Amino acid sequence: MNAEIIAVGSELLTPGKVDTNSLYLTQHLNDLGIEVVAKSIIGDDRSSLTEQIRTSLSRSDLVILTGGLGPTEDDVTRDACAAALGLTQHFDDAIWDAIIDRFSKFGRPPRDNNRRQANVIAGAEVLPNPNGTAPGLWLAPAPGKFVALLPGPPRELKPMVQDQILPRLRSLVPPSVIRTRWYRVAGVGESDLDALIAPIYTQYTNPVTTILAAPGDVHIHFRARTDAEPEAEALLAAVADPIVALLGDRIYSDDGATLEESVGRLLLKHGATLATAESLTAGLLGARVTETSGSSAYYVGGFQTYTNAMKTQLLGVDPAVLAEHTAVSEPVAIAMAQGARERTRATYALSLTGYAEGDQAGLVYCGLATPTGVQVRKLKLFGDRHRVRSLAVIQSLDWLRKTLL
Amino acid sequence: MNAEIIAVGSELLTPGKVDTNSLYLTQHLNDLGIEVVAKSIIGDDRSSLTEQIRTSLSRSDLVILTGGLGPTEDDVTRDACAAALGLTQHFDDAIWDAIIDRFSKFGRPPRDNNRRQANVIAGAEVLPNPNGTAPGLWLAPAPGKFVALLPGPPRELKPMVQDQILPRLRSLVPPSVIRTRWYRVAGVGESDLDALIAPIYTQYTNPVTTILAAPGDVHIHFRARTDAEPEAEALLAAVADPIVALLGDRIYSDDGATLEESVGRLLLKHGATLATAESLTAGLLGARVTETSGSSAYYVGGFQTYTNAMKTQLLGVDPAVLAEHTAVSEPVAIAMAQGARERTRATYALSLTGYAEGDQAGLVYCGLATPTGVQVRKLKLFGDRHRVRSLAVIQSLDWLRKTLL
């Protein structure tokens, strides 16, 4: 079974608004093994919405509409849905009584326009709304096709989803076992990674493979669905195991741990500590390492040496070396890492110096001082200021991770 | 002219993903007086997308598609658009040359699957993409109907919108005068701010007032539309001037400058420099200050003193003070700021120490050392680890800004 979600309301089409109901619904639908294949937001326009409902119902088994059930002329969901399905509406006395009852608790009668909220599309089941005036509606307009109309306010929608929608869906989807695996890979571009693993995962439709990419950080998600647990595990293993073997130590996490968490675990395991010396990134590396709670067990601190004078004063980088090689050079990255390690007495020290902008943008040197010596790597990164700095942090952490393995 | 936006990509249909491109596009379309009447997110499915493009084009003048222009089989936007419009595609040698050229900068040849990115729908104008391999496409399939295909990554999409899409749209919409003003306010919650200014802006429908909020940072946008420029300015002044008077120096920017840019400008104006001493944030403050290009003119560097030992070793914080008051205390914040200022000889030094988690989460002390002495502020911040650290950075920068005014 697949689903789509249509949120109704012009206010959801402004630059600052996000349709959070659809995120909530997606989570619960996915948990049942129902895939969300499309989402739409439609303004308060009857004919646009009618057209959208037709399109959605033609390609999806379940269409959930949220919002547009209020009392005003702008609230077009019931009318558009009836039009799309070619069904009539009738006035429901029981709903009207419940609306009168609800208003009486506030000490006033309903308005005339509230009467619209008592309209029911022919054949629909009425979903009671204990938290508002607009009831929901549930329709099965054709075999295997379902439409739900839900109120827009989250505090009305969520209880209705829990009490009315999920129980109905559970009886519709075959009881199935869903097993997932997540892997995270740093320092490989999305298209490179895809070229590497696509020959494997494209052979399988179950599990479904999803690749999510942020700059420098790619997440691979496998989701298997079957009737029996051993089979689900076998399906997962068939596609994931060869990919894991292929990627090897490029995988930094198989349990949702972030890159900085993985590095932190390895430092803890070795009883080791880390210091940082940052020019290009001016603190981004230390900030990233300490995103993880408990990081004070292994991160001691660092130096943001943004000027040459600070590199010399705080880290002891020789001014003659800076003059001869410039601040963005192998010897300076080495001296920064060594200086940070000596001054903090940490087990490891990482340094970053580079250009975020200009002719040589993306040229970065990363130093790594260890108990057995100091090494340096030249990186060539692409993107704007923000991206170059972010990639430099990721690459330096990933290098430390591989060193610790 | 009305518009709709279709975002393409199954990854945008997961419970944690928000389509931020459509928010950015909506802002710019609205600024031109183009209303966004619908938005959709469609998974990587050719026939669903084809159907959606047909539906969208039947009800809207302009359809903007984002994403799905990549090199893999999952990238279906070009194919679906060609199918929806009944047009063919051809391989474009110039695009392919540009892709080869781009890859050569990375020192390698493109892959075979990149060839798909050189396909052009018949009659389309090619929109160059200086920030990625996938060019955009612009089509005018029928009188008064327009379709744009844009890359999904924001750092590729945004420049293409600015350089290619907005100029085309400006020539298509009737010349009406639109005047906007933006104000940014730090350190005030969205609902507090709204309670303060709503009595003013709700009196006016033109200009339209929009409030966009991120934690600790609220942006207020006014947009006036008329036929004549003086009238637009008068409309803007009527609502914005009283709000500006009310907010006073809580406004840190009226020209789009970020908080760190505003602080940087003030430091430059005073010929002053800044150093940082960070415990809680471990580099986040220095990283934020240096998000702005040219920040090396005023930011000298800083100290990430995550452990007590580092506070003493690197900043000279008295171990007796640490023992008596703990690391999260007024005297330690003061000693950190003083130590950073003395060791770097910067004009100003900011320090941050606090709890991001635990019983006292959100308790933060911020120190500010200046040429005339050192001050300290106690902050009580709310939220998770990430939010507390981010708010601490914002509040410390805003304090420095007000001090520099």
Image: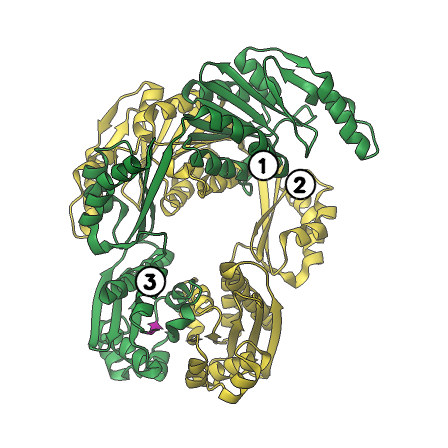
Chain colours: A green, B yellow
In the rendered image, residues at marks 1 and 3 fall on the same chain: yes
Tag 2 subunit = B
Magenta part of the chain? A273-278
Tag 3 subunit = A
In the rendered image, residues at marks 2 and 1 fall on the same chain: no
Which residue has dot 1 on it?
A: A158
Q: What's the mark number on residue A393?
A: 3
Q: Amino acid at mark 1?
A: Lys
Distance between the alpha carbons at the discs numbered 2 and 3: 50 Å
Compared across the picture, whether A182 is left or right of B7 comes to left
Q: Name the mark nearer the viewer: 1 or 3.
A: 1
Relative to B236, does residue A161 appear above or below in the rendering?
A: above
Distance between the alpha carbons at the discs numbered 1 and 3: 40 Å
The crowding category of the residue bearing disc 1, from other C-alpha atoms within 10 Å (few below 14, some 14 to 19, many at least 20), is: some
Q: Residue A276 colored magenta?
A: yes
Do the CB atoms of the residues marked 2 and 3 lie less than 8 Å apart?
Answer: no
